[in-house]
Image (tube, rainbow, N blue to C red):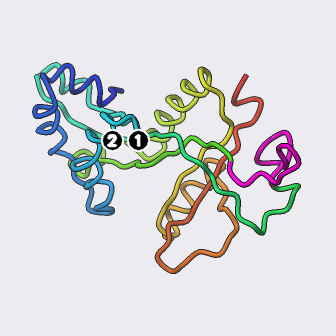
């Protein structure tokens, strides 16, 4: 795994890194491809997110950089829907549903902002392997900074919803607009953290 910051450094700058990134294609979701090609470096420089590449280590030996997949992580604020009960909020917070007598309306979360594989090498990595890399990086950050909620947003597509549910993500139960991305969260357990 290689961070975007490290890729910029070892490739000799942003322009060279951008050329390497240009070989990433994702027909299933053009937003994943567009983010990487148009926004990832900007977001990295601004500290808005961190992007990580899963790459073919054998190809590097032949002076080729093959991005198999990538994911982007960021800090996000989870807005608590008004209809959530005190018990539900307490479950999310882990401690209480109120701060200084006022209902908690926001909770910090670790956001999986983007996650996708490169069409050019899709047979070389599975979605399960990408999630394992992603979780290892999340837990590495959580060990240093804390946090207990992982959040992601996805389109209302059955195979995506099932994929994330397999990893313990639950759909936030609220009213969604037609084209609104669905929000999923996973609460890290004590076993995940210790």
Which of 178/170 is in front? 178
Secondary structure under tag 1 reads: strand
Residue under the image location 83 percent in, 52 percent down: 102
Which of 53/90 is in front? 90
Residue under the image location 47 percent in, 40 percent down: 74
Q: Do the CB atoms of the residues marked 2 and 1 lie less than 8 Å apart? A: yes
Residue 37 point in image, percent of width and height = 21, 48
Residue under the image location 36 percent in, 49 percent down: 116
Residue under the image location 55 percent in, 62 percent down: 161
Mark 2 closeness class: few <14, some 14–19, many ≥20 residues within 10 Å: some
Range of the magenta residues? 89-106
Which of 16/134 is in front? 16
In reply to whether residue 157 is colored magenta, the answer given is no
Q: Is residue 159 left or right of residue 83?
A: left
Mark 1 closeness class: few <14, some 14–19, many ≥20 residues within 10 Å: many
Residue 91 point in image, percent of width and height = 82, 48
Q: Which numbered tag is attached to residue 43? A: 2
Residue under pointer 1: 72
Residue 99 point in image, percent of width and height = 82, 44
């Amino acid at each position: 795994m290689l961070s975007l910051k490290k890729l910029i450094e070892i490739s000799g700058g942003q322009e060279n890194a951008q050329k390497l990134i240009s070989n990433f294609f994702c027909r299933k979701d053009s937003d994943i491809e567009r983010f990487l090609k148009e926004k990832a470096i900007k977001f990295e420089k601004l500290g808005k997110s961190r992007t990580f590449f899963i790459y073919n280590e054998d190809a590097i030996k032949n002076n080729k950089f093959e991005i198999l997949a990538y994911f982007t992580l960021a800090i996000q604020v989870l807005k608590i829907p008004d209809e959530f009960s005190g018990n539900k909020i307490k479950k999310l917070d882990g401690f209480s549903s109120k701060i200084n007598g006022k209902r908690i309306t926001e909770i910090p979360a670790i956001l999986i902002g983007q996650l996708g594989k490169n069409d050019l090498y899709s047979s070389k990595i599975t979605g399960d392997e990408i999630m394992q890399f992603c979780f290892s990086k999340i837990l590495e950050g959580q060990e240093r900074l804390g946090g207990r909620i992982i959040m992601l947003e996805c389109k209302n597509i059955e195979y995506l919803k099932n994929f994330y549910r397999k990893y313990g993500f639950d759909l936030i139960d609220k009213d969604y607009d037609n084209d609104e991305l669905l929000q999923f969260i996973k609460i890290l357990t004590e076993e995940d953290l210790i």
